[in-house]
Image: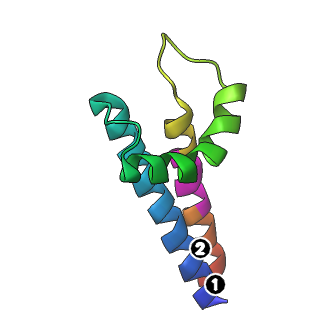
């Protein structure tokens, strides 16, 4: 059980890092055919897309990365709590 919890936690941290990279890319606007940009977009869009459709932009700002990141941190805390008990 501990191994599964550790793998899930590391996967969630990797997702958070990819979301942060995507946010940085949204500010610097790399060339769309960039391999790193394409990879980050393909990995994060299935997670951010449904949240973006349900959550309207606030003053033109997309809050879906923030919502998914916070949810990932809550899931990490829940996994740690369950695995530690």
- 48 to 17, vertically: above or below: above
Region in magenta: 69-75
Q: Is 39 inside the magenta-drawn segment?
A: no
Label 1 close to label 2 by CB (< 8 Å): yes
Give the Cα distance between marks 1 and 2.
6 Å
Taking 21 as reference, is 69 left or right?
right
SS at circle 1 = helix
**Looking at the image, which residue is at 65% across and 37% down?**
49
Seen at 70% across and 27% down, the residue is 53
**Residue 84, which numbered label?**
none
Q: Main secondary structure of the magenta part?
A: helix
Q: Which residue is most to the top?
A: 59
The C terminus appears in which quarter of the rendering? bottom right
The quadrant holding residue 84 is bottom right
* Element carrying mark 2: helix
* Residue on which disc 1 sits: 4
Q: Is residue 29 left or right of residue 61?
A: left
Q: Depth check: give the residue in front, 83 or 13.
A: 13
Please give the residue where the numbered disc 2 appears in the rendered image: 8
């Amino acid at each position: 059980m501990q191994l599964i919890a550790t793998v899930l936690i590391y996967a969630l941290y990797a997702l958070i890092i990819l979301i942060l990279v995507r946010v940085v890319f949204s500010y610097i606007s790399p060339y769309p055919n960039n391999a790193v940009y394409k990879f980050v977009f393909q990995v994060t869009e299935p997670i951010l897309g449904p949240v973006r459709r349900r959550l309207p932009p606030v003053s033109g700002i997309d809050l879906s990365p923030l919502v998914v990141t916070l949810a990932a941190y809550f899931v990490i805390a829940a996994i740690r709590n369950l695995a530690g008990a």
